[in-house]
Image (spheres, rainbow, N blue to C red):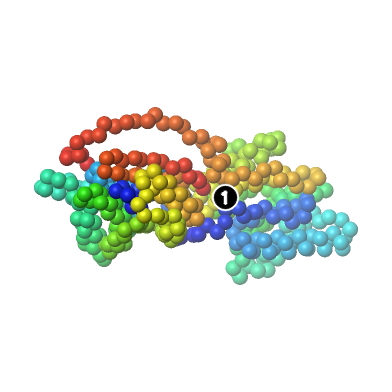
Amino acid sequence: MCILISSQTVRKIIEINPYMLGTMAGGAADCQFWHRNLGVKCRLHELANKRRISIAGSSKTLANILYSYRGMGLSIGTMIAGFDETGPGLYYVDSEGARLKGSRFSVGSGSLYAYGILDEGYKFNMSVEEAAELARRAIYHATFRDGASGGCVSVYYVGPDGWKKLSGDDVGELHYHYYPVQAAPVEQEMAEAPSAST
Amino acid sequence: MVGKNCFAIASDRRLGVQLQTVATDFQRVFKIHGKLYIGLSGLATDAQTLYQRLAFKHKLYQLREERDMKPETFASLVSALLYEKRFGPYFCQPIIAGLGEKDQPFICTMDCIGAKELAKDFVVSGTASESLYGACESMYKPDMEPEELFETISQALLSSVDRDCLSGWGGYVLIVTPTEVQERVLKGRMD
């Protein structure tokens, strides 16, 4: 199983509109296209109803579209995150047609490794900085253990005024930030006579 | 990779089960004697077993012949050992590198059933072998001194494994000259 790494700098958080974000896992083309399509549907809703669509509504729209394509080979695992009149909303939507509301999710091949860090460090009353650091560490650990995850970590904050990008770090450097190289004492071995050594 | 009266052999340090990374300090380059090294890519258990069998055969050879095996002879030994298992092979692709008579560098690689492939410049194996061929082809120059050879092989290794999701998580380079052996551990991307 040789999987080529095409890029280490893919933007996997798609900005659907200024107050809603979608994450990308699975097929890149599928995610990019259907998120953009969702953005179109959300804008049409705004124009028709003179108010923004709720996160529940937009995630349901996407889930219904994906359900109608069920079995045709779309591969999408996404989280729709945003802020509407009822407060913050986080929904997990996938190409099998599932739609789940929750307070924390992790999606993708490395999701189990990220869940390990996320579940352990999560508190409902975390500050924004703590939450961002937890998310960054969770993604970093997933990239370390999972071969199909890597590249860079982007962290976004979604608040009442919409989303804001907090950080984008390269995972290669993040590893040495969390686990700096310890200088090992240099051991000089006396060279043995070559006849009997292995 | 071959340099001027020296050679360098390098590997990554990942041990994984399909996509999951299990260890980041796995040894894949083994010493047979002071001037002969073998690198074994592929199935980890076969790499370890094959090394143990080869070390055993070499020790017996040393006892009988009272000298170390030449690299060319060792390559033939590995080839024969792999072909013995033609219909139930070891899932390993060895790379053999050594200093032969008059300290001439010798390198060769084999497929998992023992087809020897000699080369004068570089040999590669593993899941990232296609990337490695490209990187080595563009970065290699003949007759490099040990320091320059180390730089070249390290850059070729790190840039190739960064394009393969099943390789990487650090690097390990050995440079062998007639008078000394230098081991270096490379800092690479850990994703």
Residue shown at the point (54%, 47%) measured from the top left:
A143
State whether residue B71 appears in this view.
yes
Residue found at the very far bottom of the displayed protein: A72
Residue found at the very far right of the displayed protein: A50
Give the amino acid at mark 1.
Gly
Name the foreground residue: B95 vs B166. Answer: B95
Q: Is the residue A101 above or below the residue A121 in the image? A: below
Q: Position of residue A180 (x, y in %)?
A: 51, 34
Residue shown at the point (29%, 39%) measured from the top left:
B180
Asked where in the image residue B111 lies, by quadrant, the reply is bottom left
Q: Position of residue A174 (x, y in %)?
A: 56, 41
Name the foreground residue: A198 vs B92. Answer: A198
Q: Position of residue B19 (x, y in %)?
A: 47, 53
Residue shown at the point (42%, 49%) measured from the top left:
B152
Residue behind mark 1: A151
Residue shown at the point (45%, 45%) measured from the top left:
B170
Left or right: residue B96 versus residue B148 is left
Q: Secondary structure at mark 1?
A: loop
Q: Is the residue B162 above or below the residue B116 in the image? A: above
Left or right: residue B111 versus residue A73 is left
The chain ID associated with circle 1 is A
Name the foreground residue: B111 vs B182. Answer: B182
Q: Is the residue B111 above or below the residue A18 in the image? A: below
Q: Position of residue B162 (x, y in %)?
A: 49, 52
Count neighbours of disc 1 (C-alpha within 10 A) and say few if under 14, some if 14 to 19, many if 20 or more: many
